[in-house]
Image (cartoon, helix red, strand yellow):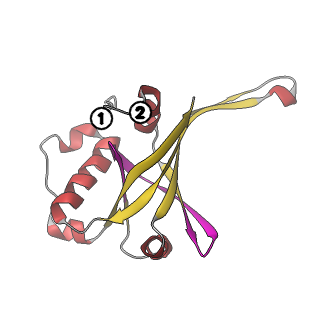
Amino acid sequence: TEKRPITRDFDKEINEIIMEADFCNVAMSKNNAPYLVPMNYGFHEPYIYLHSANEGLKIDILRRNPHVCIGIVGHVKLETSSDVCRTSMKYNSVIIFGKAEFLTNKDEKSKALTHIVQHYEQDVLRDKRIFDESELNRVTVLKVRIEKITGKK
């Protein structure tokens, strides 16, 4: 199934990069020490949705400092050359800046998880399945409002 753009206002090329990639890297900071973790994500303008276990270092960091930088990379291709100095890596990327918000409302959490699942398999939740309470309690769901976004293609 081909991923379709959800957004209306973001630049078309940036939207395509977000929709084509399989994961993102989320950077955060604790006491000026950087921490980076790969994560699955969902996108529905103007938000990136993330999910996590309920405990762990990233959760501890984000509770104290919600500022994040999210890197998304797609279409990576090494272009080799007989002259090693002319070998290059071609890729598309998006960098997003925002603040992570912990979702606690069950309806909002369920909608966010739906966006995440649909990013990977749109047909799975065509019936608008609602996650049950035990499923919602097993995960932490984060919503990042996109405050600034840049892209490279």
- Local packing at callout 1 (Cα closer than 10 Å; few below 14, some 14-19, many 20+) is some
Q: Residue 74, can we see it?
A: no
Say if the magenta span includes residue 45: yes
Q: Residue at x 41, y 48 (%)?
A: 146
Q: Which residue is drawn at 63% across and 71% down?
A: 32
Q: Name the residue under label 2.
A: 15
Give the overall secondary structure of the magenta segment. Answer: strand
- Amino acid type of the residue that numbered disc 2 sits on in the rendered structure: Asn
- Amino acid type of the residue that numbered disc 1 sits on in the rendered structure: Ile
Q: Is residue 56 above or below residue 118?
A: below
Q: What element carries label 1?
A: loop
Q: Quadrant of the C terminus?
A: top right
Instruction: Work out whether residue 151 or residue 140 is closer to the camera in this orientation and state it.
Output: 151
Q: Residue at x 31, y 67 (%)?
A: 139
Decide if residue 53 is on the left or right side of residue 23. left
What is the number of the mark on residue 63? none
Decide if residue 34 is on the left or right side of residue 128. right
Say if the magenta span includes residue 118: no
Q: Is residue 74 above or below residue 67?
A: above
Instruction: Work out whether residue 53 or residue 44 is closer to the camera in this orientation and state it.
Output: 44
Point out the stretch of residues depicted in magenta. Answer: 28-50
Q: Distance between the residues labelled 1 and 2?
A: 8 Å
Question: Answer yes or no: do the residues labelled 1 and 2 have beta carbons within 8 Å?
Answer: yes
Q: Name the residue under label 1.
A: 6
Q: In which quarter of the image is the N terminus?
A: top left
- Local packing at callout 2 (Cα closer than 10 Å; few below 14, some 14-19, many 20+) is many
Point out residue 130 in the picture as x, y percentages from the top left corner. Answer: 13, 55
Instruction: Work out whether residue 29 or residue 132 is closer to the camera in this orientation and state it.
Output: 29
